């Protein structure tokens, strides 16, 4: 499966963005999906994950209550709705797909397909 992210950009603190992750090659219904992010000079970190059916979602504490992960298996696309953005949300955001776990994973090494990333910038 190939993953292509879109929707990043430069926004002001408090604004919203919706990231999309379009998949091609195989149906994403066989994968759990995740969003990770990497800020300059920092390691890649988990942001959100969703199970294959979409019935289970998980969030990092830093984004809980502000970000919402979702998926539309019919469109072969996953999303990350980001509200109340803060300067500390500035990072490259990566979409990932995995099949290692039965339900979902919060670990980057349990995802085997990655997108190229999309930049989100929230100036101070």
Image (cartoon, rainbow, N blue to C red):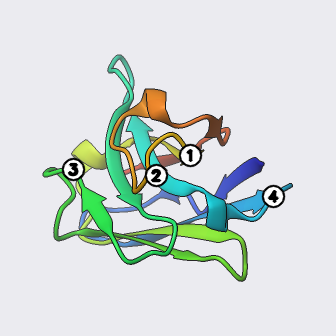
Q: Residue 24, percent across and down?
A: 82, 58
Separation of disc 2 and disc 3 at Cα?
11 Å
List the residue tagged with mark 4. Answer: 26
Answer with left or right where residue 31 lies relative to residue 59.
right
Q: Residue 74, percent across and down?
A: 71, 83
Q: Crowdedness of circle 1 by 10 Å Cα count: few (<14), some, many (20+)?
A: some
Secondary structure under badge 4? loop
List the residue tagged with mark 2. Answer: 34
Residue closest to the eye, 42 or 115: 115
Q: Earlier in the sequence, mark 1 or mark 3?
A: 3
Secondary structure under badge 2? strand
Separation of disc 1 and disc 3 at Cα?
20 Å
List the residue tagged with mark 1. Answer: 99
Image position of 29 with respect to 73: above or below: above
Residue closest to the eye, 117 or 23: 23
Answer with left or right where residue 7 lies relative to residue 4.
left
Residue closest to the eye, 56 or 37: 56
Separation of disc 1 and disc 2 at Cα?
11 Å
Query: Is residue 62 something that shows in the picture?
Result: yes
Asked if disc 1 and disc 3 are in contact, CB closer than 8 Å, the reply is no
Residue closest to the eye, 84 or 36: 36
Secondary structure under badge 1? loop
Give the farthest residue toward the right.
25
Q: Earlier in the sequence, mark 1 or mark 4?
A: 4
Name the residue: 59% across, 63% down: 7
Q: Earlier in the sequence, mark 3 or mark 4?
A: 4
Separation of disc 1 and disc 4 at Cα?
13 Å
Answer with left or right where residue 50 lies relative to residue 22.
left
Separation of disc 4 and disc 2 at Cα?
17 Å
List the residue tagged with mark 3. Answer: 60
């Amino acid at each position: 499966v190939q993953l292509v992210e879109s929707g990043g950009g430069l926004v002001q603190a408090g604004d919203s963005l919706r990231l999309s992750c379009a998949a091609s090659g195989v149906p994403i219904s066989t994968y759990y999906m995740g969003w990770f992010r990497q800020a300059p000079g920092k390691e890649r970190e988990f942001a959100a994950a969703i199970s294959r059916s979409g019935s289970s979602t998980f969030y990092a504490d830093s984004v809980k209550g502000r970000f919402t992960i979702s998926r539309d298996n019919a469109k072969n696309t996953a999303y990350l709705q980001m509200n109340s953005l803060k300067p500390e949300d500035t990072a490259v955001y990566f979409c990932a797909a995995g099949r290692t776990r039965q339900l979902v994973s919060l670990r980057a090494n349990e995802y085997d397909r990655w997108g190229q990333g999309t930049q989100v910038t929230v100036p101070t």
